[in-house]
Image (cartoon, coloured by chain):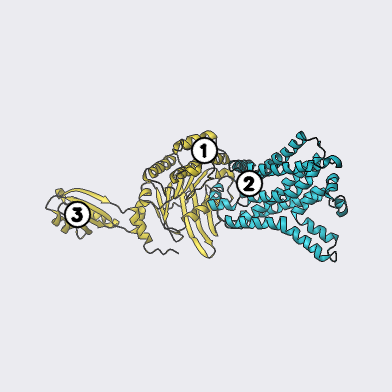
Amino acid sequence: MRAIGILAVNEFLDGLRNRWVAAAIVLLGATAMALLLVGSAPTGTIRAGALDVSVVSLTSLSVYLLPLIALLLSFDALVGEFERGTMLLLLTYPVARWQVVMGKFFGHMMILLAAVAVGYGGAAVITVLFTDNGTGGWQAYIAMMGSSLLLGAVFVALGYLVSVLVRERSTAAGVAVVLWLIFVVLYDLALLGLLLADQEQRIGQVLFSALMLASPADTYRLLNLTVFDTVGQIAGLAGVAARYGFGASLLLGLMALWVVLPLAATMALFRRREL
Amino acid sequence: MVERGSTDKAIEVTGVVKRYGDKTVVRDVDFSVRSGERMVLIGHNGAGKTTLMKLMLGLTHADAGCVRVLGGNPATAAAAQRREIGYLPESVAFHSAMKGREVLAFYARLKGVAAAECRAILAQVGLEQAADRRVSTYSKGMRQRLGLAQAMLGRPRLLFLDEPTSGLDPSLRRQFYDLIDTLSLSGTTSLTSSHSLNEVEARADRIAIMKNGSIVACGTLAELSRQAGLPVVVRLRVMAGHTPGVAERLAAMGEIRRVNDHGIDLSCLGASKMVLFRHIAGLGDVIEDMDVIPPRLDEIYNHYMEDVQIQ
């Protein structure tokens, strides 16, 4: 445990040193701020909380941003240290290989936590303090922050898997970009195309649900847009959760699986790796 | 020579084979280092020195044979055992955004070494002044010294140094070996690989020569030169005018290398050395002085590397 803590703190400090933490906070904070201000304009008549409204827009944005930040943090984590030669030395210390992976994971999660807490959290606090929209929908907002972290964790774990599989940093960077495109953009486009082409002939509700749940990004969307009724009404997805029978725990469990499986695979591959 | 049955061995390698793909990098190596010994590993590029070290550090697994370091298997070594090992890799690298002091503090925390020891070690390797600069601004020599500093953390019982002085200037090299000698005096075992033969010959208790993945010779400098069958050179200072006569009388006992009006160099094999000495002693006042020059490590090395074919 001690070794994991030391490695995690080191990774976080590294993030502070090379301005990763600052950049991520500014990025998330600025976008959240912008969406919150835009979102607070029409709320007067609908009587929905500004936070409720912004959960919808922030969810659509986070689904792109967090995987991107997470992959940028993680693709280099192992292959970079192999290439620089720092891993060789590290592994002669009293540290097991799985501890290296876990240490980096917690360190990178600390960076994401700082970005989400300060960026999204700060923007919400400022909006509540300086507008008169009140704190309505804060539960959904906090849930959005938590699930955004979980989404980040999924892509940190996937980034490690890339990082342990390839031999060169540049390859890892390329694969990470492709991974991001597939999971965040192409999969949904393909799904949409499939539905349009199919015209509800063969793809029934069950298959469609399965296809949605197979993507961590869609799972994240469902989690944020359907679990809280107020948010669902704004997003126009009210009742979807009830209809499809996706409980929050199923969605959370699926996302957790997307974290655990790549992490476990990374550790197994790393353990067999010859240095 | 390897002592059989000794339990006081820091490193014991028996019948180790390591292949990468279909290339055999280490072939059937038997090798041991006694506690407190300064062992030096020499050999051509690609001879398998670094791989052998990695096997001893548990970074790779042997395809056959057994590696024991400080009594345990390095590949499955417990944390406690790893704390007693220091390693300076060839061309050591650090996170360049970190300061020297931060780098050392990080490794100290991993080893469970008190922060106070870091300051002392930084002073010992002469990095006090530069400790608060980023590693990216360090010269090669400074990085190497920082590398040695992390290897020294926690007073390790066993040090692995992979070409520690490559790229260092002569005075730094000297400081470097002085540091290692100081550690050795306090009982630290060291295994150093090097290409600087004339540097290590005076600093090694024993030397192992590696060639194409095998250890072809291992022993003290004297043992190696005996095994190699290389001649010693005897240099005589002779009373003026007597050199032709002396050379004629000694010609049967060794090969005359050089004659001038006051000196003779002749070489003879180790086995017939004493016969030659007695003969020289019998020549009386004519011989004014005598030096015996044993073969140097680079000659021994060249002898073993003569027919090397780099694979």
Query: What residue does disc 2 label?
Result: A104
Disc 3: which chain? B
Disc 1: which chain? B
| Picture coordinates of residue A265, whole percent (x, y) | 67, 55
Q: Which mark is residue B101?
A: 1
| Picture coordinates of residue A214, whole percent (x, y) | 76, 57
Rounded to the nearest whole Å, what is the CA distance between mark 1 and mark 2? 21 Å
Query: What residue does disc 3 label?
Result: B264
**At label 1, which amino acid type do we have?**
Arg
Q: Which residue is the extreme one toward the left?
A: B241
Would residue A222 be found to the left or right of residue B141 on screen?
right
Q: Residues within 10 Å of mark 1 (few under 14, many from 20)?
A: many
Mark nearest the camera among 3 and 2 is: 2
Q: Is A199 placed above or below B124 here?
A: below
Chain B tint as drawn: yellow
The reply to whether dot 1 and dot 2 touch (C-beta < 8 Å) is no
Chain A tint as drawn: cyan
